[in-house]
Each structure stands twice: as structure tokens, then as C-alpha cells.
Amino acid sequence: MENSTEGLSSGRLKKIEKKLRKLQHVIQKEVGAQCSVDNATKILVIANAGLINGLTEEIVFEHFSKYGTITNILLIPGKSCCFLQYKEQDSAVNAYHNYNGILKIAQDSKPIYLLYCDALPNVELNRTWNDNVPGLVIIHDFISAEEERLLLQLNNFEAEDTGQMKHRQVKHFGYEFRYDINNVDKDKPLEDKIPEECNFWRRLENTEFKGFIPDQLTVNHYLPGQGIPHHIDTHSAFEDPIMSLSLGSSVIMEFKKDDAHVCVLLPLRSLAVMSKESRYEWTHGITPKKFDIVHTKNGFNSLERGTRVSFTFRKILQGPCTCKFRSKCDSKLPQVDIKNEVASQLEQEHVHKVYEKIADHFDDTRHKPWPNVVQFLDSFDVGSVLVDVGCGNGKYLGRNNNIFDIGCDMSSNLLEICRKRGFESFVTSCLTLPLKDAIADGVISIAVIHHLANES
């Protein structure tokens, strides 16, 4: 057989068996599972690779589904092991002999080691599939295949001047959603209104969403392997509900709230309606990958992603948000008189710690520079020195190769992103710069001042 252990030397086989005996005790100690080297079962455990070191359901399914139907894949948070169960024992035996000590999908492309297991460990996971997310409604086959074709023809993402996000292309109608401020400029409607081809809202007449007429449309174009970070649409920007139409390809969208994590299939030509709690309190996002593993009652299916175009319809909210979900509502943030002695503590808690936590998400959505700033950077003479105070992920560093630039920020995680991109940067507060006077020819500080707790 291809990749079979039958072709290995006796010395190599002894080393594998010795490794397996050791891992057998590790697995029993860590998760309480009884494992075996010799007694074949339907269940295999990958004993040296798991969530903690980068293994995913997609990788497991891609390789192990070749030997038969997989009925379960169990990746345990914080553990370097993974369990999978086949429908037939022969499938497990074939995978065991073909992949043990050979298949290189462990960390740093090292081989995995397999054991048989009597039963799946009893582990409570917070991720579920297609469970009820309060306020979320999926309307299947909301439009026809012909309507889908016409809608896809409305936007030529190869020829048109569309917005470019890190993980997708974007076009707006009615109003532009500005990702730099996570809101819309309600006083500046766009010339391009929502196309007439999108006037299918009478189909909601017999639903609780009767009367919904959107005035803002965002069209996102996703290639296979692209996604969107988890987020909640800004409360003060749009009314309830928000509706998203999936064209071109089905996809798994993930919803999260506190410890709850629900994966929901958005079928081709379906309309996802996010209302009430699902709109205001649950984040939603799409993990960047080229295919999804879909959990069903009968096991697992692989869903290969094609090019997907989403039409997200919203209605602009006039005035503040009046929802009851205060913890996530930007209209209900308390207005307080900040005294000098507590300002630094508040900044530490609500600015510095937050940016440390959301550094990767910030980098996903804040990589496109503002044109006026780029024009300013290009105005410096060769050899000039520039300091970017509050440089974040460094999106303005390295823009002009004829100058020397350096950035600083309070977020070490954002500065780590700068470091990986080869930019010079250091940690400091914008209020106490450790730099001599007149050291630079220019200084920029973009979107920083509003993070200070008070004027002093």
C-alpha cells in the first residue's frame, strides 16, 4: 500500500512502537482515554497533534476520509491530540497502517502517531452545529437560480473599481460603510442606489419582517480561502434586522456569544436574517478556508467553497440605537466626567488591554491607508526622518522607501505585527515620547487622540 508501514525497516518499526507505548500513557493521563497499539477499533487517536499545535478538522478529514466514512472528529481545546471515529473498523485499520509514523501533518511537518481507542472521551465542547441562535432565521431558496445569475452580473469585481479589504473585495450602494470608523456617514448618500433587481422584499409579507425596505447594500466578493473576522454590526448605524443573501457558493458562518459557539450552514441562494439578539449580541464571522466540514446526523461532509458573493441589506438608523442589549450598544456607553487621577487606569483597561486582545482583528480590517496621509508621506525629501506615534499595525510605515521611519505604540501585539513586517517600532505612550526635540522631519499620529481619557 501507498505510505504503508509495511515498507519500513524493523528498526524504524521498533522506534514507532516505542513512541506509541509512551503516547499511550500520555493520552490516558491527559484525557482519561484507554488506548491500544494492537486491539483494533473504529476509533483512532492522533496522539501527538491537536488544536493546540495547529491541527484542524479540515486537515483530518482531507487525509482520513480516503479510507472510509468518518462519523466523528473530536479536537479537544488545549490538548495536543485528536480523536476520529469511522463507520467501519476496516477503515480505521487501513488508516492506522498507512499513516502511523508516516503522514506528516503534526507540528513542524512531523509525522503523526496513531493509537486505537475503545471510546471517545466524554468532553463537553462549546461549539455546536445548526443550533438555535436567538433571532437568526435562514430562509432557504429565497431567490431562483435565474435571479442569482442576474444579481451576479450586476458587479464585475475584475473590471470595476471596488474597495479592497484584506480578505475580500467590497462594493457599497446607498451609503458607504466605513471600516475605519465602523459606521456610515449618514449625511453623504452615494449616487449608486440599491439596484432594482434587488426589489424582492414582498416575499417577506407573511413573515415577522414584513415591511423591511433597505436603503444600504454592501456586496462582498469572497474567493475560496477568504473570510471575514468576527464582528457585530454597529448598533447606531443600522436598524433591526440585517439580511444577507448568499450567491455563488454555500458557506459556514460562525456565531459566538460568551462561551457559546454555533456553526450555521448558509446554503446557496438562502437569505440569512439577523434580528434581535443575533443581530445585537452575537458576533458573526467566516473562517478563511477553502472548504468547510459540515456536521450532519450521519457524520461529516466536505463542502468545497467556490467564489461566494454576499449581498448584505441594511436600513440606516436615524438617531441613537434604542435596543435593550446595552453591553454591546455604542449608543448606551456611559457619559462620565473623567478625572485626571483615574484617566490612565481607564485607558489601560478600555484601550490598551482591548487593543492587545483584538490586534489580529484590527490588522484584518485596518490595512488600507488613507490617501491624504500617503500623499503627506510622499511629500518628504530623500533621507527625511518620520515618526508615527500610535502606529498600530504599521500600515503607514514603509510607504515611502526614500525616508527613514519609525513607529511607536502601547500595544505590544500590534508592534509584533510591525516587527514581522520588518518595520522599526518600540513600545511607549504618546504622552511620554522618549525622543529628543527636533529629532524628526515629520510626525504623524493617526486616529490616536480620541483614545485619551481626557484633555490633559
Image (cartoon, helix red, strand yellow):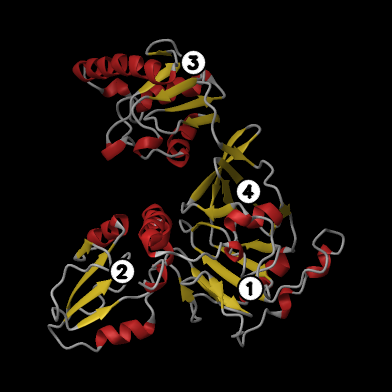
Q: Callout 4 environment at 10 Å: few (<14), some (14 to 19), or many (20+)?
A: some
Residue at horizontal 61%, vertical 85%? 187
Can residue 250 be seen at all in this image of the molecule?
no
Secondary structure under tag 3 reads: loop
In which quarter of the view is residue 77 placed? top left
Point out which mark residue 265 bears. 4
Neighbours of disc 3 within 10 Å: few (<14), some (14-19), many (20+) = many
Left or right, 418 with respect to 188, comes to left
Residue 100 vs residue 127, the one in the foreground? 127
The amino acid type of the residue labelled 1 equals: Leu
* Residue bearing the label numbered 2: 390
Marks 4,3: beta carbons within 8 A: no
- In the image, which is nearer the foreground, mark 1 or mark 3? 1
What residue would you read off at disc 1? 217
Q: What whole-number distance in Å separates the C-alpha atoms at marks 1 and 2?
A: 33 Å
Residue matched to label 3: 41
Badge 2 amino acid:
Gly
Q: Position of residue 378 (x, y in %)?
A: 25, 86
327 vs 443: above or below: above
Inter-mark Cα distance, 4 to 3: 32 Å
- Where residue 233 sits in the image (x, y, percent)? 59, 63
Q: Quadrant of residue 63?
A: top left
Could you tell which of marks 4 and 2 lies nearer the N-terminus? 4
Of circles 2 and 3, which is in front?
Answer: 2
How far is the residue under mark 2 from the one under mark 3?
57 Å
